[in-house]
Image (spheres, grey):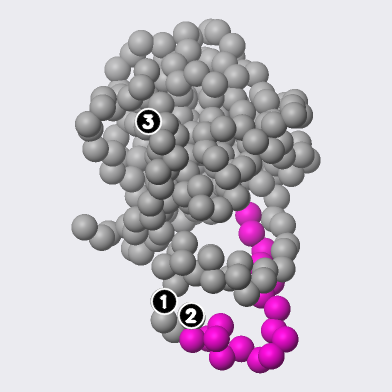
Amino acid sequence: MKALVATILVLVAAAPCLAHDTWLMPREPQVTEGKQATVELTSGMSFPQTESAIAADRVQKGAWRTGRAKGKLDKWEEGSSSLVMHLTAVGTGTMAMWLTLKPKDIELTDEDVEHYFEEIGASESVRRDWESREPGTVFKERYTKHAKSFMRVGDGGEDPTCLQPAGLAIELLPQSDPTALSVGDKLVVKAVRGGDDELEQFAVGIVCGATGASEILRTNES
């Protein structure tokens, strides 16, 4: 099970735990077909610990898919530290799960902006534009969060259906079944937009749930 857990940690982390983030995670990385599976959605600073429950009405849409079945992630129960959903695992293979939160508007302080620039590896031109702003300019942001995770159903072999895009505005697309990895294996992912538009340079955060160690890598960099 350790290999499966490590895989999930890589894929659900859209940014490392240097910032407040949101992630979707099954309580167990592998379940028996036909049995109940539990999925949690939480937000916090210490992945993979459940910390802050997101209001159920913040979820815009969510779904799951296996090789021969699909369904919605739309029946959430609000807990003290996470949103919880129970579903029946249908179809052996790998279940892909994903959701999108509704857009939210916030205002950022200068310190927040600098922190964001560090996380995304902002270019010098972007930094110059911000530094040359008019006095009193406020940085306003509208953000939408997309979460994605995987769970093995049954004892079947690798499942290529989990490699197919979910169609999120931004998502990490594994190039091999992430639940079939063993410790020491490498996992290659693509950052794509809208399902098939590969992002040449995109910051991807990776965090280890066992140690809390995190780093930011960029696509198409060796």
Quadrant into which the N terminus falls: top left
Quadrant into which the C terminus falls: bottom left
Quadrant assignment, res 208: top left
Mark 1 nearby-residue class (10 Å; few <14, some 14–19, many ≥20):
few
| Residue 59 spot, x, y in % from top left | 70, 41
Quadrant assignment, res 221: bottom left
The amino acid type, in three-letter code, at marker 2 is: Val
| Residue 172 spot, x, y in % from top left | 42, 46
The amino acid type, in three-letter code, at marker 3 is: Ala
The residues bearing labels 3 and 2 have C-alpha atoms spaced at a distance of 34 Å
| Residue 206 spot, x, y in % from top left | 40, 46
Q: Secondary structure at mark 1?
A: loop
Against 94, residue 105 (above or below) is: below
Mark 3 nearby-residue class (10 Å; few <14, some 14–19, many ≥20):
many
Residue 126's disc is 2
Q: Are marks 1 and 3 in contact (CB under 8 Å)?
A: no
Q: Disc 1 designates what residue?
A: 123
